[in-house]
Amino acid sequence: MSAYDKVLAARDTKKPTSRDYIKAMFGESFIELHGDRSYADDKAVIGGVGMLNEMPVTVIGIEKGRNTMERMERNFGAAHPEGYRKALRLMKQAEKFHRPVLCFVDTSGAFCGIGAEERGQGHAIATNLMEMMTLKTPVLSIFIGEGGSGGAIALAVADEVWMMENAVYSVISPEGCASILWKDSSKAAEAAEALKMTAQDLFDLGVVERILREPTAGDRKMFESLKLLICRTFEKNLAVPVDQLTDLRYQRFRKIGKVK
């Protein structure tokens, strides 16, 4: 598959969404928590607490929805500032109880409407980046579809970042990049190649630690394997002293982009 084919696959409406992952992995144990305690509850961001096997975990996911009505309700996965503030509230709660944090990322980017900007979209994202870097509990982020710009990295300052094989992660969409560079959005495929936004590209660059096989909605075996893998990762990181954990997270980001 070409890089742009991977982009189209990441946007496929038939892919499992964050809700599908949460349902398959946490089942009835998941309790959703709402609101940012400041403005509203953003339905583009799902968050709560559930049991991953025998481990309590705070789980946060950006939800696009499946059909047209769901997508409108979820704002097509474009979170408002209150969505990022809700996510941070849940992360700080997880830190208090030393619960690991699991994030599912699938967004073309944060919502860029006037209201979102008036309510501090940029500040909300920047605050998440700062607070997640020093969060005193393990954090794992998994890209299950699109990972667009600050809207994605606001939930991806983690000890490890994993990607599904057909997920993408970039500062801008290939269509947006082509429009800026060449004034021609039809060159999106060329832009996708240049952006190095596929899972394999980012693994080679050291931006992500693991590439995962794409599941289907009813793929119980894959979801069970993923649960086991996540549990082992959290068990490993829970055993690391907190100061060392945050330092390793900091160093992880400092080394990205270094020329060998």
Image: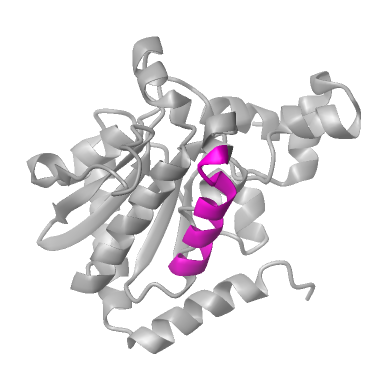
Residue in the picture at 24% in, 56% down: 58
Farthest residue in the right direction?
182
Magenta stretch: dominant secondary structure: helix
Left or right, 236 with respect to 71, comes to left
Residue in the picture at 59% in, 49% down: 122
Q: In this view, does 147 lie above or below 17?
A: below
Q: Can the viewer see residue 169 in this picture? A: yes
Residue in the picture at 24% in, 28% down: 218
Expressed as whole percent of the image width and height from the top left, the position of residue 18 reads: 33, 37
**Residue 130: in magenta span:** yes
Q: Quadrant of the C terminus?
A: bottom right
**Residue 128: in magenta span:** yes
Count of numbered circles in the view: 0
Left or right, 31 with respect to 236, comes to left
Q: Nearer the viewer, residue 78 or 8?
A: 78
What colour scheme was applied to this rendering of the protein?
one colour
Expressed as whole percent of the image width and height from the top left, the position of residue 179 reads: 83, 27
Farthest residue in the top direction?
68
Q: Quadrant of the N terminus?
A: top right
Q: In this view, does 231 lie above or below 171?
A: below
Residue numbers of the magenta segment: 118-132
Q: In which quarter of the image is residue 256?
A: bottom right
Q: Can the viewer see residue 2 in this picture? A: no
Expressed as whole percent of the image width and height from the top left, the position of residue 214 reads: 42, 37
Q: Quadrant of residue 75?
A: top left
Q: In which quarter of the image is residue 193?
A: top right
Left or right, 4 with respect to 168, comes to right
Expressed as whole percent of the image width and height from the top left, the position of residue 202 reads: 63, 54
